[in-house]
Amino acid sequence: MDNKEAEMDCTELKMSNAVEQKVEEIVRKEPIWIFGYGSLCWNPGFGYQQSCIGYITGFSRRFWQGNTTHRGTDAKPGRVATLVEDKEV
């Protein structure tokens, strides 16, 4: 692991911990709904009380976004699901 990878892992860990802490603060106060697609569907990374299938009208899921975090390389980024407006609806 080079310095760039170590810095990214550290930054991701800090962000992950900060997000987890904020979600815990919100959940303690009131329920929160999170719309998930892609990896949030099969590995959300946090506990939940209820799950249900839903959709957003007018948007489609596409693998157009490139990403090198946990997938791919700088030269060939892995594809990540993203929501795009569906102009045909």
Image (cartoon, rainbow, N blue to C red):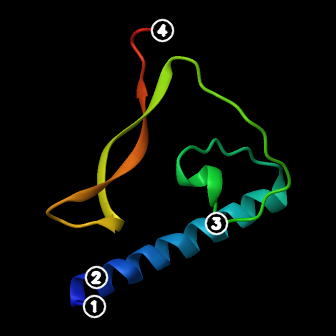
Q: Earlier in the sequence, mark 2 or mark 4?
A: 2
Q: How many other residues sit within 10 Å of disc 3, few (<14), some (14-19) or many (≥20)?
A: few
The answer to whether marks 1 and 4 mark residues whose Cβ atoms lie closer than 8 Å is: no
Indicate whether 66 appears above or below 54: below
Cα–Cα gap, marks 3 and 2 = 21 Å
Disc 4 is placed on an element classified as loop
The Cα–Cα distance between marks 3 and 4, rounded to whole angstroms, is: 32 Å
Q: Distance between the Cα atoms at labels 2 and 1?
A: 6 Å
Looking at the image, residue 52 sits to the left or right of residue 65; the answer is right
* Earlier residue among tags 3 and 4: 3
Instruction: Write down the quadrant of residue 56 in the picture.
Output: top right
- Residue to which mark 4 is pinned: 89
Confirm or deny contact between disc 3 and disc 2 (CB under 8 A). no
Q: Which mark is residue 5?
A: 2
Answer whether labels 2 and 1 touch (C-beta < 8 Å): yes
Q: The residue under label 3 is which amino acid type?
A: Gly
Find disc 3 in the rendering and name its residue: 45
Q: Please, is residue 2 above or below residue 43 in the view?
A: below
The mark nearer the N terminus, 1 or 4, is: 1
Q: What residue does disc 1 label? A: 1
Q: Residue furthest top?
A: 89
Query: Dot 2: few (<14), some (14–19), or many (≥20) neighbours within 10 Å?
Result: few
Q: Amino acid at mark 2?
A: Glu
Callout 4 amino acid: Val
| Circle nearer the N terminus (3, 2) | 2
Residue 47: percent from left, percent from top: 76, 64
- Using residue 16 as the reference point, say whether residue 49 is left or right of it: right
